[in-house]
Amino acid sequence: MNTFGNKFRLTTFGESHGVAVGGIIDGCPSGIRIDFDAVAADLSRRRGKAGAGASARALQESDQVEWLSGLLDGITLGTPIGFIVRNTAQQPDDYSNLEHVFRPGHADLSYLKKYGIRDARGGGRASARETVSRVVAGSIAKQILAEKGVSVSAKVIMVAGFGEERADQWEALISEARQDGDSVGGVVEGLISGLKAGVGEPVFDKLQAMLAYSMMSIPAVKGFEYGEGFREAQMRGSRCNLLRDGISGGISTGDDIRFRVAFKPTPSIAREQIMQALEPDGSFTERIVSINGRHDACVAMRAPVIVESMAALVLVNLI
């Protein structure tokens, strides 16, 4: 599906190297004055910065939002909000040598097997370029939550296995990986504050279940945990019972909620790799290919605002 949410619904569209990406937000309440500067600031955070692993493509995109509907003088009408963000720095020729080659760690082959066709230009819909639309909608969701006293924030807490105590070395680690034609992963921690007790549904729409579902939909995410997560499996019950992780029975308790999201290293790297290739006769062979183009050396560095956006969308829907 290309739609997230059942109350505040976001439908995204567009491909990585197509004309534009965009979205339709349905179910947004009327009478909300949108802070467009805040939306622009969130998109700027998503683009990242040089030296922190961001791709050249991300740094080159202007990410200017064109609002198509649902607003009058910056105030929501309660009708569907349509928007697009044009792709101004696409370079589809970077992928001309990959039209019949399937990159490891990407959705290339699975998309072909599912649909019988795929967009080889940067992964098409499977590209993280799609998250631009999530950030636009998530920024609006955060503004709605702020009026209710709820804040959602996220930050990188680990890069290449090194925690915040070595944050001053992260850029060097990322740069070293890029120079080696490689990439590194990272972990982002999210924090929800000010959420009143009672948010979340029993059984299937538990708050933590919805958070996990939303985070696992973000490209490159490999894991989710909240509270003490997997560390609780190493504790005794007497210790676990003292923890206050903000969720009980799938419903918020009023305490802060902390969660962590693991991002894998970017699979598009400059090193030569063995890849599957589809031959004209329909058979599969193996080729040694180096991926050209502009790719993040550490996608986690640009991910905090995406994590915030998805968490905000979850909360707006549940509230």
Image: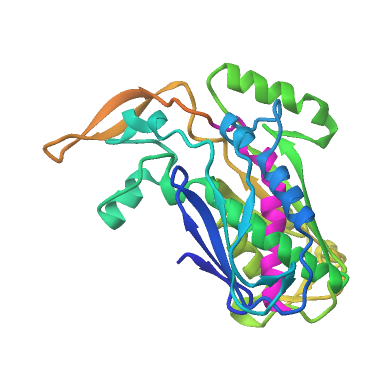
Q: Quadrant of residue 301?
A: top right
On the image, the x and y values in percent for residue 151 come to 83, 63
* Rendered view: 10 above or below 275: below
Tell me what residue is drawn at x 66 percent, y 75 percent. Answer: 206
Please indicate, yes or no, whether residue 219 appears anywhere in the rendered image: no
Q: Position of residue 171 (x, y in %)?
A: 73, 25
Image height of 246 relative to 56, above or below: below
Q: Which of the pair 117/202 is nearer the observer?
A: 117
Magenta-colored span: 295-319
Left or right side of 289 for 82: right
Provide residue 289's location: percent of width, then percent of height. 35, 24
Q: Inspect the magenta stretch and tell me whether residue 311 lies in it.
A: yes
Asked if 113 appears above or below 72 in the picture, the reply is above
In the picture, the quarter occupied by the N terminus is bottom left
Q: Is residue 72 left or right of residue 131?
A: right
Q: Residue at x 57, y 35 (%)?
A: 265
Determine the residue positioned at 26% across, 29% down. Answer: 286
Residue placed furthest toward the left: 281
Q: Position of residue 96 (x, y in %)?
A: 33, 30
